[in-house]
Amino acid sequence: MSITGIILWPGWRKLISGFKIKWNAHPKRVNFDVHKVAGVITAIFLICTFFTGFCWNFEEFINPLVYAITFSKQQAPPISAPITDKSLVGLTEQLKTAQAALPDAALRRIYVPWILYFTVKS
């Protein structure tokens, strides 16, 4: 509907007058002008929202296209692996590091990922 609304928008004939609202005209004309200006602005927003959602949902098709258009190489995804010769940092050490980095901050909550919680418990 957004695309057909933009195609049928009467402002294409004279672009500047397509965005004008004649406030002193008859109420039906004011309603028409407000409708056409608000409609084209909303349609542009909706098309941008559609395009973003389409790219997020179909990124396996869109990403190669983006890399081809921008002449850039696709980078390998980052891999997180524990360092074998080092031990895990405990919660108290993490809190000390955070307190040193932000001395005026107050600790309110600690969020623990559930996956980590279940793997440590079992």
Image: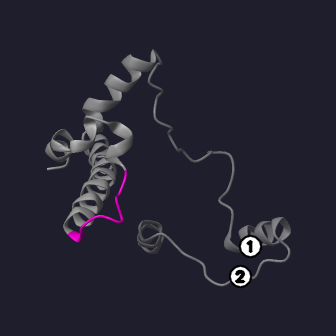
The magenta stretch spans residue 114: no
Among the 4 quarters of the image, the one containing residue 42: bottom left
- Going by the numbered disc 2, the residue's amino acid type is Leu
Q: CA distance from mark 1 to mark 2?
A: 9 Å
Cβ–Cβ under 8 Å for marks 1 and 2: yes
Query: Is residue 78 positioned above or below 72 on the image?
Result: below
**Crowdedness of circle 2 by 10 Å Cα count: few (<14), some, many (20+)?**
few
Q: Specify whether 18 is left or right of 88.
A: left
Residue at the image position 22 percent from the left and 60 percent from the top: 32
Question: Can you identify the residue that label 1 sits on?
Answer: 95
Total numbered badges shown on the rendered structure: 2
- Please give the label number shown on residue 61: none
On the image, the x and y values in percent for residue 61 come to 25, 30
Question: Can you identify the residue that label 2 sits on?
Answer: 107
Which element is circle 1 on? helix
Q: Which residues are magenta?
A: 20-27
Among the 4 quarters of the image, the one containing residue 88: bottom right
Classify the position of the C terminus by image quarter: bottom left
On the image, the x and y values in percent for residue 98 come to 76, 68
Query: Is residue 99 positioned above or below 11 on the image?
Result: below
Residue at the image position 34 percent from the left and 52 percent from the top: 41
Which element is circle 2 on? loop
Q: Main secondary structure of the magenta part?
A: loop
- Going by the numbered disc 1, the residue's amino acid type is Leu
Q: Reading the chain from its start, which is encountered first: label 1 or label 2?
A: 1
